[in-house]
């Protein structure tokens, strides 16, 4: 079901583009789907077997690229959808990559750190034959991080009997990671938002922002946005949300979250943190706040046809993958609420992953300022192209982004030969 919803995004794109039917056929199914059972020895000596996935959707434009998530809801449909979105996203960003995704059906919160390490290394052993810096390059995703990527790169090196740092991106800095990768998704999303505001809603007033999801991407987006003068009035995690119309101290909220695993509005002076007045909300209530920008940085299908009519934000920014359903898209569009789509807004992570891959393969490493400069250059360029498509075709930003990406994919597919070419031989 979820994959069918993802493919619905292509229907309006094919209506607007004059592309060969073979492009539609190629993009309607993944190229390769691999499922593996991963045995893990637990700390108490028992053996558990976890189901792992790696789906390589399309490699027409280059080796496939995509993260690995550890989550109890991971299944074939979800990973296929995510690999499809990665294919489009890499094309939207103009990267020489195809799309892939991986995952393990597991609740990592129930595992010890050593059990997570064994699972991470077991994943690489299960899929090593289909990975490689010129074939398929994983990265972190939900509930995976730089440490896990470091373990995975190390396991691959032991299997391959050589160091191949370009096999995985999002690694720790001392294991050949890239500066700027940790906050790249949030930074890229802010670049996309700023470009959108400049084109569509120039204003000197302080913008109000609500952020659903306070993981890596959501935190860094909120942190950088506040530094740039935006007012972050609400933040949520999986337990609930906090709201203060005067604005939250993002760094202090994050500090408390790391120390006590709870959200609260606080002000910290050195080691002393004082709790401030704030409201507690449900995640659902946060979505319905009257703010300038609603940032979706949690999981898929957060806005659906059931709650789309209650959304009051003027603009929705998708940092998560697929947080707005196709039916909700139509409702928001009819209500003139713009959605800055995930395939553009969260492309910062894969763009800086590309930079890391380039650095690993060349042996030349960049300073953080250069990474940020190159990220901004790509995000601005591709955002402007998408806004031009939206104006030309009189369509939503999502459809415009897909038009932009599918045009590149169609060009690569056609230039390898299609029915029209071979019919003339």
Image: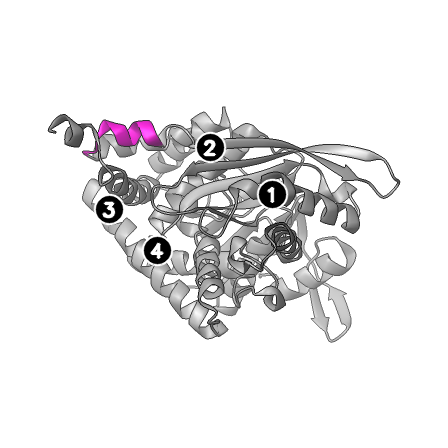
Res. 340 visible in picture: no
Q: Is residue 20 magenta?
A: yes
Q: Nearer the viewer, mark 4 or mark 3?
A: 3
Residue under numbered circle 1: 69
Across and down, in percent, residue 110 comes to: 78, 41
Looking at the image, is mark 2 or mark 4 earlier in the sequence? 2
**First-in-chain label (1 vs 4):** 1
Please state which of residues 139 and 2 is positioned toward the viewer in this rendering.
139
Badge 2 or badge 3: first in the primary sequence: 2
- Kindly report which numbered mark, 1 or 3, lies closer to the viewer in this rendering: 1
Q: Which residue is mark 2?
A: 32
From mark 4 to mark 3, how far is it between C-alphas? 13 Å
Magenta stretch prevailing secondary structure: helix
**Which of the two labelled residues, at mark 4 and mark 3, occupies the earlier sequence position?**
4
Question: Which scheme is used to colour this image of the protein?
Answer: one colour
Which residue lies under the disc numbered 3? 389
For the residues labelled 2 and 3, the Cα–Cα distance comes to 31 Å
Instruction: Specify few, some or many for label 3: CA neighbours under 10 Å numbering under 14, 14-19, or 20 or more.
Output: many
- Over which residues does the magenta segment extend? 18-26
Mark 1–mark 3 distance (CA, rounded to whole Å) = 32 Å
Where on the picture, by quarter, is residue 8? top left
- Residue 51: where, in percent of width, then height? 66, 32
Mark 4 residue element: helix
Relative to 264, is 217 on the left or the right? left
Disc 2/disc 1 C-alpha distance (Å): 18 Å
Task: Tell whether 356 sits left or right of 254.
Answer: left
Q: Are marks 1 and 3 in contact (CB under 8 Å)?
A: no
Instruction: Identify residue for label 4.
Output: 196
Q: How dense is the environment of label 2, judged by Cα within 10 Å: few (below 14), some, or many (20 and up)?
A: some
């Amino acid at each position: 079901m979820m994959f069918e919803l993802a493919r619905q995004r292509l229907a309006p794109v094919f209506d607007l583009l004059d592309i060969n039917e073979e492009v539609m056929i190629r993009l309607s199914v993944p190229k390769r789907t691999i499922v593996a059972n991963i045995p893990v020895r637990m700390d108490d000596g028992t053996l558990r077997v976890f189901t792992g996935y790696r789906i390589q959707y399309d490699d027409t434009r280059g080796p496939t690229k995509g993260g690995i998530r550890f989550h109890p809801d991971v299944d074939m449909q979800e990973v296929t959808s995510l690999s499809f979105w990665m294919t489009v996203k890499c094309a939207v960003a103009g990267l020489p990559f195809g799309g892939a995704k991986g995952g393990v059906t597991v609740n990592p919160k129930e595992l010890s750190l050593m059990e997570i390490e064994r699972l991470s290394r077991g994943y690489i052993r299960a899929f090593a034959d289909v990975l490689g810096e010129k074939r398929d390059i994983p990265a972190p995703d939900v509930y995976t991080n730089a440490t896990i990527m470091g373990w995975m790169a190390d396991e691959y090196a032991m299997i391959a009997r050589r160091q191949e740092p370009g096999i995985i991106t999002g690694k720790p800095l001392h294991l050949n990671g890239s500066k700027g990768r940790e906050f790249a998704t949030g930074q890229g999303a802010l670049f996309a938002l700023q470009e959108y505001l400049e084109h569509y809603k120039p204003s000197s007033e302080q913008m109000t922002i609500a952020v659903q999801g306070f993981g890596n991407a959501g935190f860094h987006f909120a942190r950088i946005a506040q530094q740039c003068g935006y007012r972050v009035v609400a933040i949520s995690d999986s337990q609930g949300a906090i709201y203060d119309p005067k604005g939250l101290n993002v760094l202090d909220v994050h500090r408390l979250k790391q120390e006590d695993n709870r959200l609260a509005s606080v002000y910290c002076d050195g080691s002393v943190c004082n709790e401030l007045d704030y409201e507690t909300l449900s995640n659902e209530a946060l979505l319905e706040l009257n703010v300038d920008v609603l940032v979706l940085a949690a999981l898929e299908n957060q806005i659906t046809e059931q709650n789309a009519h209650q959304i009051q934000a003027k603009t929705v920014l998708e940092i998560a993958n697929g947080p707005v359903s196709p039916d909700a898209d139509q409702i928001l569009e009819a209500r003139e609420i713009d959605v800055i789509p995930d395939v553009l807004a969260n492309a910062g992570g894969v763009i800086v992953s590309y930079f890391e891959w380039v650095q690993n393969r060349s042996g030349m490493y960049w300073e953080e300022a250069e990474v940020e400069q190159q990220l901004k250059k790509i995000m601005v360029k591709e955002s402007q192209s998408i806004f031009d498509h939206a104006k030309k075709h009189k369509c939503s930003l999502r459809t415009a982004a897909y038009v932009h990406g599918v045009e590149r994919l169609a060009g690569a597919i056609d230039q390898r030969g299609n029915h029209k070419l071979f019919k003339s031989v």
